[in-house]
Amino acid sequence: DVKVTQSSRYLVKRTGEKVFLECVQDMDHENMFWYRQDPGLGLRLIYFSYDVKMKEKGDIPEGYSVSREKKERFSLILESASTNQTSMYLCASSGGSSYGYTFGSGTRLTVV
Amino acid sequence: AQSVTQPDIHITVSEGASLELRCNYSYGATPYLFWYVQSPGQGLQLLLKYFSGDTLVQGIKGFEAEFKRSQSSFNLRKPSVHWSDAAEYFCALRGTGFQKLVFGTGTRLLVSP
């Protein structure tokens, strides 16, 4: 089975800190995604990547950046964390058009 | 633009009863559609997907979904619900161009004894 691993299940950070959320997949998938999940809003796409060093903005990229230096790793960066970025963050990967996404277990980030 | 609507925020079903979760979509062509389930504190697990062909799709855990083009719907069904089915369910549509998934806002299923 494909595994998507997010390095932290829970994080607490202070306002203004730079925060790194890491995601690793083990199935050589080209496509990787970062979503945030908030009650009543469902999942919203932050950024995605279809190849190493390639990235595209999703629907809510403001306040975030990403890095994909290696195919298996896709990092989400909060340049200066704010309280409105408190959320559940979900990473996913996909191998091709005939596949759905495989999700990690999520990182619940609290910014205080 | 594509969108997915799940009109029910919460649904409560008695254990052993049948279940139908509604999903409506807006898209200009034949969509690729998915249902995911999320248990508390977990990521999302794919239940089933529709790409083309037979409009009744079978998935894992005894779930099925029917694609109805005329109604722009992709409702999820299960004939007999188990307490372990209590979770949040998301319908999703694959958009144009790159493989972005657009999600509905989810339906939380509660199962009563």
Image (tube, grey):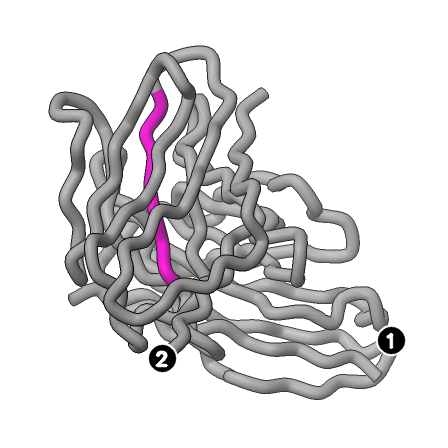
Question: Residue A10 at what x, y percent from top left?
Answer: 58, 86
Q: Are marks 1 and 2 in contact (CB under 8 Å)?
A: no
Question: Mark 2 falls on what kind of element?
Answer: loop
Is residue A74 shown left or right of residue A17?
Answer: left
Question: Mark 1 falls on what kind of element?
Answer: loop
- Judge whether residue A47 can be spotted in this image: no
Residue B33 falls inside the magenta stretch: yes
**Quarter of the N terminus of chain A within the rendering:** bottom left
Q: Image quadrant of residue A111?
A: bottom right
> At label 1, which amino acid type do we have?
Gly
Residue A84 falls inside the magenta stretch: no
Callout 1: chain = A
Q: Which residues are magenta?
A: B31-37
Per the rendering, the mark at residue A16 is 1
Question: How many labels sit on residues?
Answer: 2
Q: Which residue is mark 2?
A: B113
